[in-house]
Image (cartoon, grey):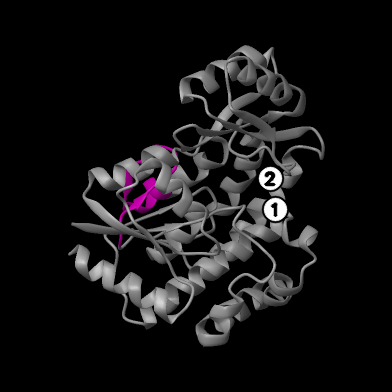
Amino acid sequence: MKSAFVFPGQGSQSIGMLRAAAELWPMISETFDEASNVLGYDVWHLCQRGPVEELNQTAITQPVLLTASIALWRQWCVAGGPRPDYMAGHSLGEYSALVAAESMDFIEAVKLVQLRGELMQEAVPAGEGRMAAILGLEDADVVAACEEAANGDVVAAVNFNAPGQVVIAGSAAAVERAIEACKARGARKAMTLPVSVPSHCALMKGAAEQLAEALEDIRFNDAVIPVVQNVNAEAAKDAETLKANLLKQLYSPVLWTDSIRSLTDEGVNVAVECGAGKVLAGLVKRIDRDLPVHGIEDPDSLANAIAAFGQSK
């Protein structure tokens, strides 16, 4: 049997995140200090004090969550945690997975995801893009509703998070039309999300072109642990493949349901959510109730996760 680490993306941030862990493990503060030195502001202070409006800005949220995930990954390694057989990250979390898999350098990744956030914010003027969560519909029905609502504008299913839970994104007017189309098809709930950046849709292609230039200056190594990537739900270790798919991810759907099923098809029977919050644990429970997902919050949860990994072998 095998194990996996999964790394969360935007939406997992909160004021006070990792506070208890930092009081116990110096590695947390050390990692946040590294990020602060690169970014030019006190990342830890922002996480603990806010304001929340600043923490939720895409260009800030992304390096903050990457730092949180890598801080916990480093603590896992320091504590003697076994190397997982696979890694996967949800959206932004894929960058964390690549750092942990030694395909990217942490400091370079921090700078890159800050740029990624800035480019995403600049790609679509405020108020012109939108995202919405659609609950209680089959994936195919959400896709059909988006096609029906497009009417020449951009709107698409972009996050296949779990059965019956899909996020759509695109231009504001088209997303509103798609919401109504999903309701007409029987969606249990269809609601806009409090974000202005329409991630993972065609509106991000301009940002991807600019990000491609930055990626040319970053060294990618072959991963020491296979990473299941968002765009195709397939595991890869080759540096060029990882890099190409990371770029496509910016304007392509996140196939999270398929990614978790890929892991279980490979024999994964235990996982750790390495980052702030428990968003991915909730999604995995909807995808495969038989796959336990452990958190890393304190010495007890860390010890429990390490023990579970040992039992999976």
Q: Quadrant of the N terminus?
A: bottom left
Residue 51 placement (x, y as % from top left): 80, 65
Residue 264: image x %, image y %? 27, 46
Relative to residue 10, is residue 239 drawn left or right? left
Q: Quadrant of residue 163?
A: top left
Residue placed at 76% from the left, 28% from the top?
A: 172
Residue depicted at 63% across the width and 52% down the height: 116
Which secondary structure, mark 2?
Answer: helix
Q: Which residues are magenta?
A: 225-242
Q: Quadrant of residue 274?
A: bottom left
Amino acid carrying label 2: it is Met
- Nearer mark to the viewer, of 1 and 2: 1
Visible in this render: residue 82?
A: no
Name above or below for residue 297 compared with residue 193.
below
Residue 195: x %, y % from top left: 72, 44
Instruction: Between residue 196 and residue 98, name the one nearer to us.
Output: 196
The disc at residue 144 is: none
Given residues 271 and 198, the one toward you in this image is 271
Asked whether the residues under the numbered discs 1 and 2 touch, taking CB atoms below 8 Å apart as contact, a structural biologist would say: yes
Q: Which residue is mark 2?
A: 120
Residue 240 magenta-highlighted: yes
Q: Is residue 54 above or below residue 76?
A: above
Identify whether 171 is placed above or below 277. above
In the rendered structure, the answer to whether residue 131 lies left or right of residue 109 reads right
Query: What residue sits right under mark 1 in the picture?
Result: 58
Whether residue 46 can be seen here: yes
Q: Earlier in the sequence, mark 1 or mark 2?
A: 1
Quarter-of-image position of residue 197: top right
Which quadrant holds the C terminus?
Answer: bottom left
Q: Residue at x 41, y 74 (%)?
A: 301
Q: Which amino acid, by three-letter code, is at mark 1?
A: Thr
Is residue 218 on the magenta stretch? Answer: no
